[in-house]
Amino acid sequence: QVQLVESGGGLVQPGGSLRLSCAASGIIFGIYTMGWFRQAPGKQRELVAAITSSSSPTYADSVKGRFTISRDNAEKTVYLQMNSLKPDDTAVYYCNADGRTIKRGLYWGQGTQVTVSS
């Protein structure tokens, strides 16, 4: 059974930092592209950042220079370091594991709330 479990969300003031973690089980972690998405109230889910199996990152323009995605294949965990947070970053953040290009599945975590407010 595949599980993706996010942690690290919470309430932070504008300009602050948070580090999200997503621990995976039930998949061969190292061969999946791992991603972080977010969904704010009334908005569609959007890609925040992704990192390929060869650790090549991609970022949404809105978070470039502020967020950093990384992965630890030995720990089967993907991280999202979020700095200089803004109120617009408030959303539920979801981790995903995308194996579709290698004929494997697409899996999602349950999400973790990030609220940026003073």
Image (cartoon, rainbow, N blue to C red):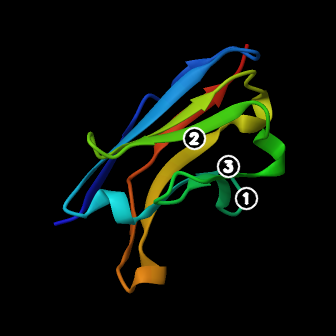
SS type, badge 1 = loop
Residue nearest the observer in this picture, 113 or 49:
49
Whether residue 7 is situated above or below residue 2 in the rendered picture: above
Q: Which residue is mark 3?
A: 40
Q: Residue at x 69, y 63 (%)?
A: 44
Whether residue 19 is situated above or below residue 60 in the rendered picture: above
Q: Which residue is mark 1?
A: 43
SS type, badge 3 = loop
Total numbered labels: 3
Mark 1 or mark 2: which is in front? 2
Whether residue 58 is situated above or below residue 2 in the rendered picture: above
Residue nearest the observer in this picture, 68 or 73:
73
Q: Which residue is mark 2?
A: 69
Q: Residue at x 56, y 23 (%)?
A: 18
Q: Amino acid at mark 2?
A: Ile
Figure quadrant of the C terminus:
top right
